[in-house]
Image (cartoon, helix red, strand yellow):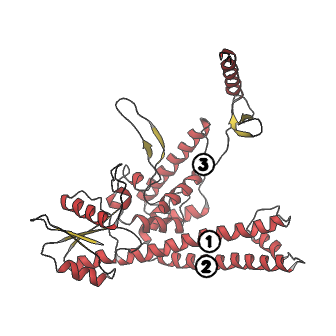
């Protein structure tokens, strides 16, 4: 669905076009010049934007997540959306996104294909492990290693159904691992090309950032010069949410908006800085090929992130994936029960013993001070 607004007369015209790029470009070129076009970023990619730019038509690609919608607007149709985009383009209030080049989009597709394979491998492994768990089989050592694979190959089943299911699940894991290995090889070769080698090499000086992570960040972010240290966090959704009014300021968890792939890579790399600060042989090898200024900047960043983790641990700051925290003064962990009815009981979290006693005392006082109700 397309909508056109005459800038002089204010006339609004709507019509349904073919989704082919040639048809859209031909219709836009038939409009009175100068014309401007906008559309929402989505699965169609940026081919239409490049075609319009080659035809001399200004095109703005919009981020759908940043378009504001009135709370009372409950009617959504293609025609209303097209008209709203046209009116916002007319007054210049559209949040545009950067249009990558064809080469950048090609390598980004490769990186995201590897991300899809990672998810497929995780699901295939889960299916195999749960199949074995239903048969009462589990591996005592570290899973998904060479020794684990030898153990899997040694299994045999008498029942035909279980044997066929195991073979299919195991073959799926092996096939997905082979797909991942092929993509890793292709990414490593592309990372060594002159277009990506400088950025990948500089990012590789940080702890937790190897070739795959550095190449993924380079392709997802693209032009690093459009960001600063204060603005790149909002692009990857690593800034806290906020709901403030007047003197009241309230911040919440991170927004998790923007590029989710780049955010996952950064979060996984940040976990490596929690360990004791010691440079590995691989990290030293990666840093030796970089200039002294890059090594000094990476050293400062590595130490700063490690100090941040140290302060978190000193404050007993609970990491996201832990279920509880250790109390240094108490020296032990206490499970606090929370009751939800007489028949349903759950153990929720790990609480300081003094805090648990204080909460129990407060609840007991509330029950004692509660007035009696006479029927």
- x, y percent for residue 13: 20, 70
Lateral position of residue 342 relative to residue 97, left or right: right
The reply to whether residue 291 is visible in this rendering is yes
Q: How many marks?
A: 3
| Residue identified by numbered label 3 | 274
Determine the residue positioned at 47% across, 77% down.
190
Figure quadrant of residue 106: bottom left
| Residue identified by numbered label 2 | 179
Q: Nearer the viewer, mark 1 or mark 3?
A: 1
Quadrant in the picture for the N terminus: bottom left
Decide: few, some or many residues near mark 2? Use Cα within 10 Å; few <14, some 14-19, many ≥20.
Answer: some
Determine the residue positioned at 47% across, 49% down.
300
At mark 1, the secondary structure is helix
Q: Give the spatial CA distance, label 1 vs label 3.
A: 29 Å
Q: Is residue 333 above or below residue 155?
A: above
Lateral position of residue 329 relative to residue 230, left or right: right
- x, y percent for residue 173: 69, 75
Q: Nearer the viewer, mark 1 or mark 2?
A: 1
Q: Is residue 52 above or below residue 273?
A: below
Lateral position of residue 198 relative to residue 17, left or right: right
């Amino acid at each position: 669905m397309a909508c056109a607004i005459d800038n002089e007369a204010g006339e609004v015209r709507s019509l349904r076009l073919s989704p082919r790029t040639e048809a859209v470009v031909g219709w836009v070129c038939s409009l009175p010049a100068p014309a401007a076009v906008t559309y929402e970023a989505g699965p169609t990619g940026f081919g239409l934007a490049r075609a319009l730019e080659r035809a001399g038509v200004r095109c703005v690609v919009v981020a759908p997540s940043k378009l504001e919608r009135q709370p009372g607007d409950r009617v959504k149709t293609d025609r209303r959306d097209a008209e709203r985009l046209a009116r916002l383009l007319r007054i210049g209030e559209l949040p545009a996104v950067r249009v990558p080049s064809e080469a950048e989009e090609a390598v980004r597709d490769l990186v995201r294909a590897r991300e899809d394979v990672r998810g497929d491998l995780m699901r295939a492994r889960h299916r195999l492990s749960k199949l074995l768990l239903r048969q009462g089989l589990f591996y005592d050592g570290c899973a998904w290693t060479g020794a684990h694979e030898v153990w899997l190959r040694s299994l045999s089943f008498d029942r035909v159904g279980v044997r066929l299911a195991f073979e299919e699940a195991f073959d799926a894991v092996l096939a997905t691992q082979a797909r991942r290995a092929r993509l890793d090889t292709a990414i490593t070769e592309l990372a060594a090309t002159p277009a990506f080698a400088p950025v990948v090499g500089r990012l590789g000086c940080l702890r937790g950032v190897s070739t795959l992570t550095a190449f993924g960040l380079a392709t997802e972010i693209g032009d690093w010069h459009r960001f600063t240290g204060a603005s790149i966090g909002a692009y990857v959704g690593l800034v806290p949410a906020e709901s403030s009014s007047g003197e009241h300021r309230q911040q919440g968890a991170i927004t998790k908006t923007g590029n989710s792939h780049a955010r996952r890579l950064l979060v996984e790399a940040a976990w490596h800085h929690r360990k004791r600060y010691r440079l590995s042989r691989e990290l030293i090898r990666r840093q030796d090929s970089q200039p002294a200024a890059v090594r000094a900047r990476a050293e400062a960043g590595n130490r700063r992130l490690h100090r941040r983790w140290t302060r978190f641990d000193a404050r007993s700051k609970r990491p996201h994936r832990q279920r509880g925290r250790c109390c240094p003064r108490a020296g032990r962990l206490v499970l606090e029960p929370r009751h939800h009815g007489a028949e349903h009981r759950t153990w929720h979290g790990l609480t300081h013993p003094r805090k648990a006693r204080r909460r129990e005392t407060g609840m007991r006082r509330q029950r004692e001070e509660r007035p009696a109700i006479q029927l």
